[in-house]
Image (cartoon, rainbow, N blue to C red):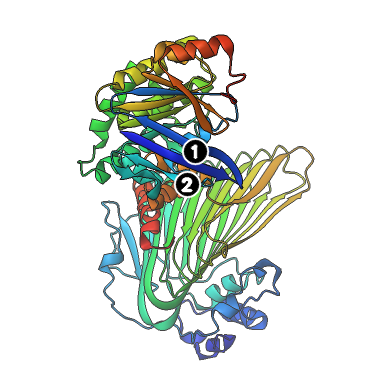
Amino acid sequence: MLEIKGLTAKIDDKEILRGIDLTVPDGEVHAIMGPNGAGKSTLSYVLSGREGYEVTGGSVLFNGRDLLAIEPEERAAAGVFLAFQYPVELPGVGNANFIRTALNAVRRARGEPELDAVAFLKEARSAIKALKMPDDMLKRNVNVGFSGGEKKRNEILQMALLKPALALLDETDSGLDIDALKIVADGVNALRGPRFSALVITHYQRLLDHIVPDRVHVLAAGQIVRSGGPELALELEANGYAGLEAA
Amino acid sequence: MSDTEFLDRVDFAARTGNDPHRVKAAETFRAHGWPTRADEAWHYTDLKASLRSFDLTLPGQGAPDVGGMIPRTAMPKVIFVNGRFDESLSDSSRFVRRFDDHASARADGTRPLVSLNTAVANDGIRIDVPGGTDGGTLFLVSVTDTPCQDMLAPFHRIAVGAAGSLTVIEVVRGAGRYMHNVVTEIALAEGAVLRHYRLQDESIDAVNVTTALVDLREDARYEAFTLNYGAKLSRYEAHVTLSGPNAAVHLNAAQLLAGTQHGDITTVVAHRAPHCASRQTVKSVLAGSARGVFQGRIEVAQWAQKTDGYQMNQALLLSPDAEIDSKPELEIFADDVKCSHGATIGAIDPEQMFYLRSRGIPEAEARAMLIRAFLDEALEPVTDDEARSIFEAAIDVWWQKGVL
């Protein structure tokens, strides 16, 4: 369970998060919607431990553990996964090597045995097939020369193999055509279960047609201004975000 | 004391290969002295200063225990211990002969360390692969463990005949305090191919200066990679002359330096025939207050039309106290050529670091992955599996040595 209480954070002396209260119980998928500049991406970065953000107040507990006190790699080992809005290119790093190193680092941290190359490739190939990705995806350098859609699918591939307990999907739908969107949604839905929860950050409602959330929250000017069921997303789609800041 | 007077103690008449050539080379070196920053070619590497506390002697015979430093391989090995060929440790090869004539034919006085090597070289091998023959893979291993402040000065010559081929893997390791001044002459006949890989992993108290003089005839190919890894101060200096049409050289190098190490990669690629290609990718990874130097000159003679030259040198600085000096030079006298060069200096990208760490990869391991990725392009010519695993192993443990 993810419990965020009174979270405030700033970057370069500019306050972006201004008191977030949010609880995501195990097994639930919550959507965070909101206009540009509301602090959606900042929230995902603060939760995953990116440098440059100063947490000025509040707390974040994940399964009872103080998430803000530990390093990004420890958060990953604890089960947190951030699907990047802009996945980073790593020239000179093979995708298979990257994902296997990550998987084994996480397994090591959890006290699980590491996967050898053969066992890893077997798992990776079946995940690639399920995501309808090209076979050479593992051989290429990480995200180098990938189309926008391929980069997003590569994020989902990593998620499928790392099997996180909490996925933070930061605008994973941006730049995707409808087929790719469905594949990405299928990847998330395949993980849904009592031990998986997710925060789906999106500007648009259309992703939520495919990943149906348990709850929808509206983030505006660094605060959650409304929460509701999946129908809230439809309402926002119809009426837009105008006027929400004042709510 | 590191002045040239140690040469006074050398009895040239008594040394093997006794000839006026050596005496002349000694005179040339004496007249010039050790290179200092006043020498243009040595502006960024002060060899004389690095040798200031050395009291150089020429080595006697010894039998140190160097077994642990010798790479394990099924390939034939030629092994030098403390600068001397060790017959008992070496495998015999029909292509290898111990030198009986030590003088370097090219000691023309313009390179003081080559003159010095010519004057005092007392061992070395020649590798001769006849035309049309595949010489396979040969390890050339140099291990040093000496408490004395020896100057080791081997001289090697590698010749591959027309359409012949050879892979040479050089591993240079040591313990103790010494100076290693190596000269290797390489002659590749028409259509010959030499793959030449070198790991310099000398003692951290040692000084290594290695000069490679390479000549390529028509259609010959030289594929080289060298890694500066050990030594207090090291310089790898390669002079490659493309003297026949359609010859091609891939002259890559890298250095991984930490602490107060100083590493210098100096290359001169001379296009002296038309339609030749040269490619160079040189990468320096510098931690602590290490200092790296790259000097790379491409010379294109007036008649060397259709030259295709490429040179890239990049440095990754892991600490604010690390320093790189980079001096690329193009000297082009032909008018129909394609030559490009570039240089970059940077640090580890924080976005890339965060991406790796967000996937659970610990900071030190993430940094090691990015360092390995940075070196990737430089390692391209290393197509031999055994050579590659030697370099990968060295790169892999570099960050574990606590240098970061």
Measured as percent of width and height from the top left, residue B172 is found at 40, 64
The answer to whether the residues at label 2 and label 1 have Cβ atoms under 8 Å apart is yes
Image quadrant containing the N terminus of chain B: bottom right
Reading the chain from its start, which is encountered first: label 2 or label 1?
1
The answer to whether any part of residue A180 appears in the image is: no
Q: Secondary structure at mark 2?
A: strand
Q: Any mark on residue A19, and which?
A: 1
Measured as percent of width and height from the top left, residue A156 is found at 39, 25
Q: Quadrant of residue B114?
A: bottom right
Residue appearing at x 77%, y 46% in the figure = B302
Measured as percent of width and height from the top left, residue B349 is found at 54, 46
Q: Secondary structure at mark 1?
A: strand
Left or right: B49 in relation to B228: right
- Kind of residue sitting beneath label 1: Gly
Query: Which residue carries the number 2 mark?
Result: A57
For label 1, count other residues whose C-alpha is less than 10 Å away and answer few (under 14), some (14-19) or many (20+).
some
In this view, the residue in front, A197 or B47, is: A197
In this view, the residue in front, B244 or B355, is: B355
- Kind of residue sitting beneath label 2: Gly
Q: Eyeballing the image, is B194 above or below A231?
A: below
Left or right: B215 in relation to A99: right
Measured as percent of width and height from the top left, residue B116 is found at 56, 76
Q: Quadrant of residue B97?
A: bottom left
Indicate the chain on which mark 1 is placed.
A
Image quadrant containing the C terminus of chain B: bottom left
Residue appearing at x 40%, y 71% in the figure = B203
